[in-house]
Image: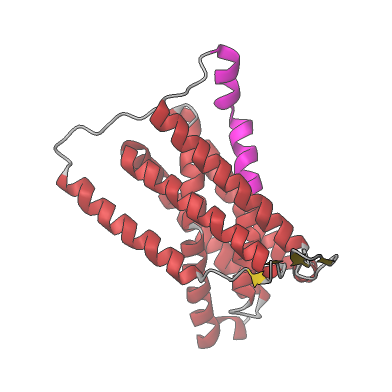
Amino acid sequence: MESLFSLDNLISLLTLTFLEIVLGIDNIIFISITASRLPKESQAKARNIGLVLAMVFRVILLFGISILISLQKPFMHIDTTYFKVAPTGQGVILFIGGLFLLYKATNEIFMKLEGEEEHSTKAGKAINSVAKVVTQIALINLVFSIDSILTAIGLSDNMWIMIIAVVVSAVIMMAFSGPVGRFVNNHPSLQVLGLSFLIMIGFMLIAEASHGSELSILGNSIGEIPKGYLYFSIAFSLFVEFINIKMRKRNKPVDLKR
């Protein structure tokens, strides 16, 4: 127990907690936008369930590190004239998750800007179902959790440090998910920007899956997209948008469909 709270472990804990929060930003954006489809009284419940699921998935994956590592190994090899690929379990999960993010974000942008809302009671209930929203959150949480845990494993080999970092970061995100969700929902331009981030992240997941599976098309390999570039572009875009919001706060914002 004393070694757990050594200076090196405390530094690792702070670093991992910060990293988990940064990597969880895209998760909070997805959860907030998805939960915004629900009635206001159900949004907090959906957000909290989503973040609890994210924490549970991460802890389970930490205890199943050997299984997670095995997902990085190719389960088959395909070598043809036009392309080569050695798909892995992790690659398949990330690829499907990336496609889902692209579909979900693009569909949300279309519905908000074009106003394509289902008018029937049956369809409305289906869209506003807490169970449906939580299911979508759970599926994408699985993808985000794999990516997050693999990053954490590269920074620390202490299981308890990683578990504590996951739990602490989840509690912090739960505390701020409400204000973040309300802020995003009250600013339509920020909603569209957040959905654009999800498209970028979805593309990054597909590229990461292709790179990890050694995909080569016509002799051209798929490169890996450095995550630092992605998060810098997100941070810069948010900074610019916050300035825009401050400058136009006297004007009434456009009311997008929810």
* Magenta stretch holds residue 125: yes
Q: Residue furthest top?
A: 120
* Magenta stretch holds residue 244: no
Q: Residue at x 51, y 58 (%)?
A: 24
Q: Is residue 75 left or right of residue 110?
A: right
> Image height check: is 227 above or below 154?
above
Residues in magenta, as a range: 120-139
Q: Quadrant of the C terminus?
A: top left
The image quarter containing residue 211 is: bottom right
Location of residue 159 in the rendering, given as x and y in whole percent from the top left corner: 67, 74
Q: Is residue 170 left or right of residue 157?
A: left
> Image height check: is 222 above or below 127?
below
Location of residue 108 in the rendering, given as x and y in whole percent from the top left corner: 48, 36
Q: Residue furthest right?
A: 76
Q: Is residue 22 left or right of residue 158?
A: left
Q: Residue at x 65, y 79 (%)?
A: 158
Q: Quadrant of the N terminus?
A: bottom right
Q: Give the total number of marks visible in the rendering.
A: 0
- Residue 56 visible at all: no
Location of residue 104 in the rendering, given as x and y in whole percent from the top left corner: 55, 40
Q: Residue at x 44, y 52 (%)?
A: 197
Q: Residue at x 59, y 31 (%)?
A: 130
Render colour scheme: secondary structure
- Residue 1 visible at all: yes
Tell which of 257 and 53 is nearer to you. 257
Location of residue 46 in the rendering, given as x and y in whole percent from the top left corner: 54, 38
Magenta-colored segment: predominant secondary structure: helix
> Image height check: is 210 above or below 189?
below
